[in-house]
Amino acid sequence: MTVTVTVSSTTTKAAFFHEPGQLRKACRQGAFTTSTGGQCPGFVQANLLILPARFAADFERFCRRNPVSCPLLGVSANGDRKIPAPLISAGAAQLDSDVCSDLSGYNVYQTSSGKLLSSTESVEEIWRPDFSSFFIGCSFSFENALAAGGLTPRHWSTGGQVAMYKTKYKLLPAGVFQGHMVVSMRPYRKEDVLKARQITAEFISTHGEPVAWGYDQAKSVLGIEDISKPDFGFPTEILEGEVPIFWGCGVTPQLVAMETFARLAKERESGESGAMPLIEGEIAIGHMPGHMLVTDLPEEAVAHGQIIR
Amino acid sequence: MTVTVTVSSTTTKAAFFHEPGQLRKACRQGAFTTSTGGQCPGFVQANLLILPARFAADFERFCRRNPVSCPLLGVSANGDRKIPAPLISAGAAQLDSDVCSDLSGYNVYQTSSGKLLSSTESVEEIWRPDFSSFFIGCSFSFENALAAGGLTPRHWSTGGQVAMYKTKYKLLPAGVFQGHMVVSMRPYRKEDVLKARQITAEFISTHGEPVAWGYDQAKSVLGIEDISKPDFGFPTEILEGEVPIFWGCGVTPQLVAMETFARLAKERESGESGAMPLIEGEIAIGHMPGHMLVTDLPEEAVAHGQIIR
């Protein structure tokens, strides 16, 4: 199965926002359409996956069984377009919020195949009253802490996106959902591995400490054959004396959904019993990678994991 | 590294209890010293791991990162010997409770090596004021539901313990803790796999749905080479037309602790930086396998996962 994720690269200089509410408003008005990386420093950014009702209970359980890859920060069920507190501050901000347009880009998938149908800046026109929206932690939230600790991620200075890899590490199945872990990689000096682990350990709602480190584990635990060839993002140079460190990555939920839809299609073709029936035209939606929901939650709020569901 | 877990087999007929409080009292008085399998039907039984304070935060994070193997039901910190509500009903029962003697058997380990020191019926004499006790879900809790659904586990009728396997599935590290998943296996007819998955899916506080099923996944996901040779418990026959189904298993936390202590000893020997310093005579304690804490929690209470920490 081939799974494609479109990653847009920002070529024009985007406006810079401090206030998450202002950024979301610009998204809603179609004035901000690029990656949210570096926007609204200090505020948590979240991954998004929107699923039809018949997939929602299984996916929520998938997140709870695999919280390192899919740290669930909030859910809006039954077609509710408002984004839940504490992701968006209760009150006027929350009443204003709209999951259909508060992000700067969305990917739309066919549930019948797992294939990408289109990328768009608003999903208002294709919204369905049975959709559930899942908001999932993102590793942007601990990069500031790494930098503050003297461990600035290399891709910050090279201007690229963090290197991401599809792995052979099988996540624990839940209902129809099965799939593999995606990881992000940041290289550090061997003697800094412990420090990098300790700094990120507290961010349990946003992937937490690394899942693996070193060249041996890259191969033996994750099955990554060639670190110079990431599946998403940009290659990051690993200098002499450094080792690759791998963290859980919020691209995982979208990949798992696509992998699952593709497998269900195959099961239907082979007449396997228990397969989910086909619903023509049914869709699922994710954020366009890099185009996250910028929340009102300060990063300190996830540093101790208290808001994970 | 060789890790040994002592599993006692019950040869004499033990008294039968309906009331968890009565069973715990019998344990406390030294009158009940055998396996708790089949005792107090309908009440949740829990795995126990007791660790010195310096390991507690890392281990709690290990549980939160690996909730399928280590579903954390409760913690007593700072040497508190009382067992927390709702595991033990708040009030007189809880004031009476004593983690040092309310189980029918304990294994005592050296933290300096991970080796088993002794097995005992009470740990009152060796209790330390800095101990934290971790109470972890157990798959006994969903076996009644399987039986009620017409899927009686085979080992119930053969009288043996469920078959358990050490696997090559690496759990996600947290601080010093690293280790591999232990699974329990129950065989079912191929056409009943979906039903077995659905029945156990709701028991998210007690391992939940299977982690893998079928001969292919036994090898490819778990690395089990010979299903006829479990590492703990008794071999279970798999009949024609049946497949092995594997669930997370509460032996995991003890194995991970032993694996971790053994690795730390090796790191100290090789002078690896960041290794935990040796503390002579320091111990950790687990329940003797099969000798669980019988709680006051009805099984329905864990069937929807609401009490997982």
Image: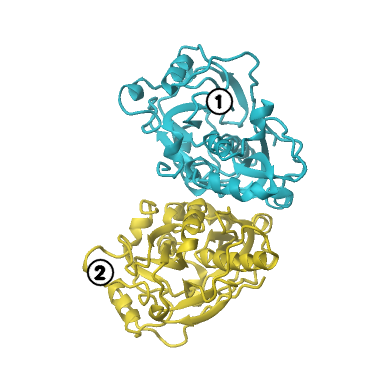
Chain colours: A yellow, B cyan
Residue depth check, mark 2 versus mark 1: number of the one nearer the observer: 1
Can residue B235 be seen here? The reply is yes
**Quarter of the image containing the N terminus of chain A?**
bottom right
Q: Amino acid at mark 2?
A: Leu
Residue B272 numbered tag: none
Q: Compared with residue A27, is residue B249 higher up or lower down, i.e. above or below?
A: above
Residue extending furthest toward the left = A92
Q: Amino acid at mark 1?
A: Gly
Dot 1: element: loop
Asked if disc 2 and disc 1 are in contact, CB closer than 8 Å, the reply is no
Could you tell me which residue is drawn at 46 percent across and 67 percent down?
A52
Front residue (pair B211, A41):
B211
Could you tell me which residue is drawn at 41 percent across and 86 percent down?
A13
Front residue (pair B289, A205):
B289
- Answer with left or right where residue A100 lies relative to residue A235: left
Q: Chain of mark 1?
A: B
Can residue A19 be seen here? The reply is no
Front residue (pair B48, A267):
A267
Task: Give the total number of marks visible in the rendering.
Answer: 2
Dot 2: element: helix
- For label 1, the crowd category at 10 Å Cα-Cα, with few meaning under 14, some 14 to 19 and many 20 or more, is few
Find residue A77 and report its horizontal and vertical position in percent. 38, 62
- For label 2, the crowd category at 10 Å Cα-Cα, with few meaning under 14, some 14 to 19 and many 20 or more, is some
Q: Chain of mark 2?
A: A
Find residue B122 and report its horizontal and vertical position in percent. 50, 17
Residue at label 2?
A: A95
Find residue A241 and report its horizontal and vertical position in percent. 61, 61
Alpha-carbon distance for marks 2 and 1?
53 Å
Residue at label 1?
A: B38
